[in-house]
Amino acid sequence: MSTSEQRPTSLLEAIRYFSDLDICTEFVAKLRWPEGPVCPRCGCMEYSYLSTRRVWKCKACKRQYSVKVGTIFEDSPLGLDKWLPAVWLAANTKNGISSHELGRALGITQKSSWFMLHRIRLAMQTKSFLKLSGEVEADETFIGGKGRNKLPHEKKRKPRGGPGGKTPVFGLKERDGRVHAEVVPNVKGDTLKLRVARAVEQGSNVYTDQAPV
């Protein structure tokens, strides 16, 4: 049965359905390339498919590419048979799901499930499995009122990572439109570089007001 004829309606069905890596590959390929696979390097749509490795080989530039390249699934040792049930869970759990719950459901470590949830939430925000690419602008800001204007009980809370206890927010925007923003613990270089690596495709040009990220 093709991916268009059957969609899982429960976690158990999702785990069973996506246990087949061929189905997973077809599922993501149809979402990513509705008109057929496109080489991410040169844009050619002529290819040969190596079924034993589940990769495509471009007939123009001769490069091989998988359905994970340039997506939130890239650079992860976990297969799509873990990623897609995780996406299903994150999208269908009304009150959200913790990394501990996800780890138990999929039989993976809490550290791995935390990494997955971070990337899945990025995809839900940008409405795409693809990472930001091309020319991407990066900037940070601080949100929140002045400390002296806060209520007494709010002043007792642990100060946030920004000046005056404000919340630091880091944003990324493709020049053609897609946006990603998230609260960060601080705006130090290492912190922001990690966020860029997670959200932006390798080879893209990232522009900042100050030092390059």
Image (cartoon, rainbow, N blue to C red):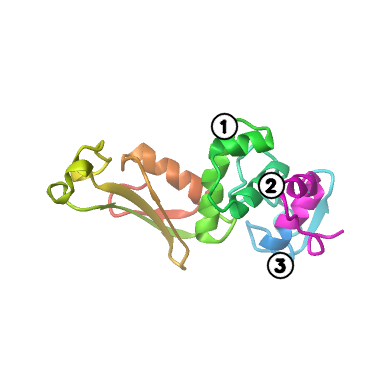
* Residue 107: image location, x then y, percent: 68, 33
Disc 3 residue type?
Answer: Pro
Please tell me which of labels 2 and 1 falls first in the chain.
Answer: 2
Instruction: Inspect this view and state whether residue 188 appears.
Output: yes
Residue 12: quarter of image: top right
**What element does badge 1 sit on?**
helix
Nearest-to-viewer mark from 1 and 3: 1
Can residue 55 be seen at all in this image of the molecule? no
**First in residue order: circle 3 vs circle 2:** 3
Residue that mark 2 sits on: 85
Q: Residue at x 57, y 42 (%)?
A: 116
- Camera-nearest residue between 89 and 130: 89
Question: To which residue does mark 1 refer?
Answer: 110
**Measured from the top left, where is residue 55 in percent x and y?**
76, 49
Name the disc covering residue 34, or none.
3
Disc 1 residue type (three-letter): Gln
| Disc 3 to disc 2, C-alpha distance | 21 Å
Instruction: Identify the secondary structure beneath mark 2.
Output: helix
The residue shown at (50%, 58%) is: 125
Q: Residue at x 65, y 32 (%)?
A: 108
Magenta includes 13? yes
How far apart in space, not on screen, are marks 1 and 3 (Cα)? Answer: 34 Å
Q: Is residue 93 left or right of residue 172?
A: right
Q: In the image shown, does 123 or 36 lie closer to the viewer? A: 123
The boundaries of the magenta stretch are 1-28
Circles 3 and 2: CB distance less than 8 Å?
no
Which class describes the residues within 10 Å of circle 3: few (<14), some (14-19), or many (20+)? few
Element on which disc 3 rests: loop
Q: Find out whether the residues at labels 1 and 3 contact each other: C-beta distance under 8 Å.
A: no
Image location (x, y in percent) of residue 101: 59, 37
